[in-house]
Amino acid sequence: MIFTGYYAKLNQYKTLGLEPIAISGKRPNFYEGLYYPDFAPRYWMYQRWKDKDITNEGYTIEYKNYLNTLDKEEIRKDFESYNGEGNHCILLCYEKPHDFCHRHVLAEWLEENFGWRIEEI
């Protein structure tokens, strides 16, 4: 199973036996786990959103358009290896669970494209 969460709860996720995978452009200095850079939003997308040049909806559209350019078979293979033998992973970013974040958009995209059910912890 794949979950989503945020860096501030990293130790709790590790205690649960989850394999953390960073999906943000930058990672906190204390983070030493796996990193999946293809899932990080492109800097220009993030900057346009941060500068309020695009809305959450516009950001979602741009980010999903970007995700659609990725190699889906490669993603499938990667996540099968992360989740093999009963392991579960958690995709990490900075925002709190109820804040707008690309990890929620990514979770929706993964479910739409792979049928994977992804839960926020």
Image: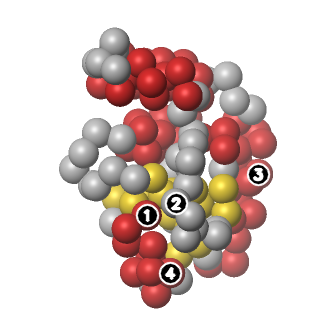
Disc 4 and disc 1 in contact, CB within 8 angstroms:
no
What mark, if any, has residue 14 been given in the picture?
Answer: 4
Residue at 27%, 55% (x, y): give it: 97
Q: Quadrant of the C terminus?
A: bottom left
The answer to whether residue 77 is visible is: yes
- Looking at the image, is 92 positioned above or below residue 69? below
The local secondary structure at tag 2 comes to loop
Residue 42 coordinates in the image, percent (x, y): 58, 28
Which quadrant would residue 37 be assigned to in this image?
Answer: top right
Residue under numbered circle 2: 28
Residue at 45%, 80% (x, y): give it: 11
- Looking at the image, is 36 positioned above or below residue 5? above
Q: Say which label, 3 or 1, has the lower sequence index.
A: 1
The Cα atoms of the two marked residues, 2 and 1, are separated by 8 Å
The Cα atoms of the two marked residues, 3 and 1, are separated by 25 Å
Residue 90 coordinates in the image, percent (x, y): 50, 64
